[in-house]
Image (spheres, helix red, strand yellow):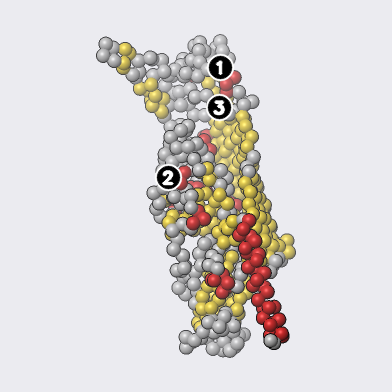
Amino acid sequence: MNHKRFSTGIRRLLPVLIQTFVLLLFVSSVFAQETTGGLQGTVKDPSGAVVPNAQVVLTSNTLTGNKTVNTDSSGYYRFANLPPGSYVMAITAKGFRTTKREGLVIEVGHLPTVDLTLEVGGTETVVEVSGATPAIDVTQNTTQTNITQDVVQDVPHGRSFQSVIQFAPSARNEPLEGSNVASNGTGGVSPGNGSNGSDHGFSVAGGSDSENSYLVEGQETANLIGGYSHTNVPFDFIQEVQVKSSGIEAEHGGALGGVVNVVMKKGSNAYHGSVFGQLEKGGFDGSPTSRIRYDANSAGQVTNWGFIDPAYQNYQPIRPKTFDYFPGLTFGGPLMKDKVFFFLGFNPEWQGETRTLNFGPTNGGFVPFSQNTQTYYTTARIDASLSQKIRVYGSWLYQYQRQAGEDLPRSDNAQGYLNPVTGCFGIASTPCVNTGTPKFVYSHDLGYSAPNSTTNVGADITLTAWLETALDIPCCESVTFATTK
């Protein structure tokens, strides 16, 4: 036996064995997340022959360091675990001009194919490819829609990331799909109970909201009964929202409707930040929605053939005093250029509502009742490129909420109808005797506090192209440890 040849073969095989061992170790203890995309293609010369050993380099402001691969003997190249964003690709090979293509958009879960033809010449000459065919992914059998950052910025949407679900084909808003108007579409109770019937539920591919899967950075956050995400994410923390409606992978076996995946922003080689805010006050809004109710001052009428219901009333509530302040800031950049990157975000929301009710002159007159809700959205993320093939990261999303004044009484009305809470006839009739609900039921001291944190620690490990193909490893999944509270 030629021991030198044997030892050389072992040295060449050792990195592959180590990568396989690491992969199996992770798979046995954690789960995969789809938070990245990929890119593949073939490099050829003008005659159509493949060009082996051509160097392909990807650069991007959203990329944590440049990525480089060489084409194999078939002229094939492949990049995996690419953060979503816009990329520039440069190809160099001996005896050919350097070819450069800009504006390659990589989306989460996609593996588009980009084939390029090199021109004969020196590498010092750069050929920029423009007007090329858009990169199309023909490798996936999943029907998915990616709502990218430019769409999020330019298209009107609601407060919750769930509001962009209806941008996807076969997805639609369903008013009775298990959401709660009091929580801005970020939570609720099970369908048919409580205060459902608002406009925050979504049906995907014919499934109900409770049959959808809601992921944040690939981690499940859905309430299986109510059909909503336990975790809301401000849009200024979001890089992309992915909605899958058919051909969903087995790892999402519990999703009979759709899979909604939120991919968070991350740091890059350029420092970037933003300061933003939203403001809404009651004076900007229209009148409260009127309600149809029975006359609360009547018990109906009993006849010899049955019972007649009380008369209906169109109850128009008095406009309450409301406010909603939603300021925020983000900042990210390199801690070590091309190596370590960070992203921070803080986006608190302060909401308040005050209703003033007439309890009559002998019971305190006009009494204000208020409800104040504070939600503190915070995110922090660190990414580190250990090598061309290994990137590790850790992210933390915190959503602490507290409320004072858990219940508010029913508003007085503009018509002067009886208010069952106060026992008075609204603003139209000041003298009255309180026979309604005691005021302490609506005390401002009653409330709650609700911490909510989501933590992810993981790694994107890129194996050799042939090993990924042999093991059927997707282009876009990372191995992750994750916890939710």
Q: Secondary structure at mark 2?
A: loop
Mark 2 surroundings: few (<14), some (14-19) or many (≥20) residues within 10 A: many
Callout 2, which amino acid?
A: Ser
Separation of marks 1 and 3 at Cα, in angstroms: 13 Å
Q: CA distance from mark 1 to mark 2?
A: 40 Å
How crowded pointer 1 is (Cα within 10 Å; few <14, some 14-19, many 20+) is rated as few
The amino acid pointed to by label 1 is: Pro
Which is more N-terminal, label 3 or label 1? 3
Dot 3 corresponds to which residue? 407
The residue at the point 45 percent across, 68 percent down is 138
Asked which secondary structure carries label 1, the reply is: loop
- Considering every residue shown, the one lying at the far right of the view is 336
Q: Residues within 10 Å of mark 3 (few under 14, many from 20)?
A: some
Name the one closer to the observer, 385 or 220: 220
* Percent coordinates x, y for residue 172 in the rendering: 41, 48
In the picture, which quadrant includes the N terminus?
bottom right
Q: Which residue is mark 2?
A: 208
Q: Earlier in the sequence, mark 1 or mark 2?
A: 2
- State the residue in front, 388 or 413: 388
Residue 23 falls in image quadrant = bottom right
Are dots 3 and 2 in contact, CB under 8 Å? no
Q: Residue at x 52, y 62 (%)?
A: 109
| Location of residue 314 (image quadrant) | top left
Q: Position of residue 93 (x, y in %)?
A: 59, 84
Q: Position of residue 435 (x, y in %)?
A: 50, 12
Residue hosting label 1: 438
Residue located at (54% from left, 71% from top):
470
